Image (spheres, helix red, strand yellow):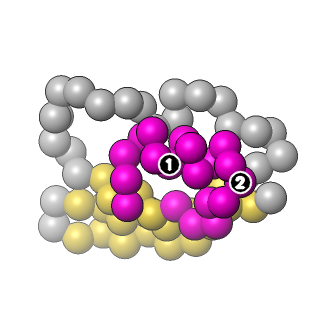
Amino acid sequence: MGGGRVIAAARAAGVLDELRLHVVPVLLGGGRPLFAEPMDPAVALETTRVELSSGVTHVIHRVLK
């Protein structure tokens, strides 16, 4: 769990093996974009599951190294 800065730091350190995004269509106003910095081309995300429920979409990605 964490915001864009925590996830970016984990990506940069190479310790991220799964990314779970919970997408809710609500405008909060601030924050840091999750993919503001380009990813290392050697790292790719593979979508393994998408779950739809009322008002939220859960997207699970596996990090391929």
Q: What amino acid is at disc 1?
A: Ile
- The CA distance from mark 1 to mark 2 is 11 Å
Expressed as whole percent of the image width and height from the top left, the position of residue 1 reads 37, 61
Q: Is residue 47 visible?
A: no
Residue named by callout 2: 14
Q: Is residue 17 magenta?
A: yes
Let me know if residue 27 is in the magenta part. no
Quadrant of residue 27 within the rendered picture: top left
Would you place residue 57 above or below residue 33 in this image?
below
Image point 50% across, 48% down: which residue? 7
Magenta span of residues: 1-19
Q: What residue lies at 45% left-to-right and 39% top-to-bottom?
A: 5
Quadrant of the rendering where the C terminus is positioned:
bottom right
Query: Callout 1 environment at 10 Å: few (<14), some (14 to 19), or many (20+)?
Result: some
Residue that numbered label 1 is attached to:
7
In this rendered view, identify the residue nearer to me: 19 or 5: 5
Q: Where residue 22 sits in the image (x, y, percent)? A: 33, 59
Amino acid type shown at disc 2 = Gly
List x then y, in percent, for residue 28: 16, 34
Residue extending farthest to the right is 42
Q: Which SS class for mark 1?
A: helix
Tell me: residue 37, above or below residue 8. above
- For numbered disc 2, what is the local secondary structure? loop
Pick the front one: 7 or 38 = 7
Give the camera-side residue of 17 and 23. 17
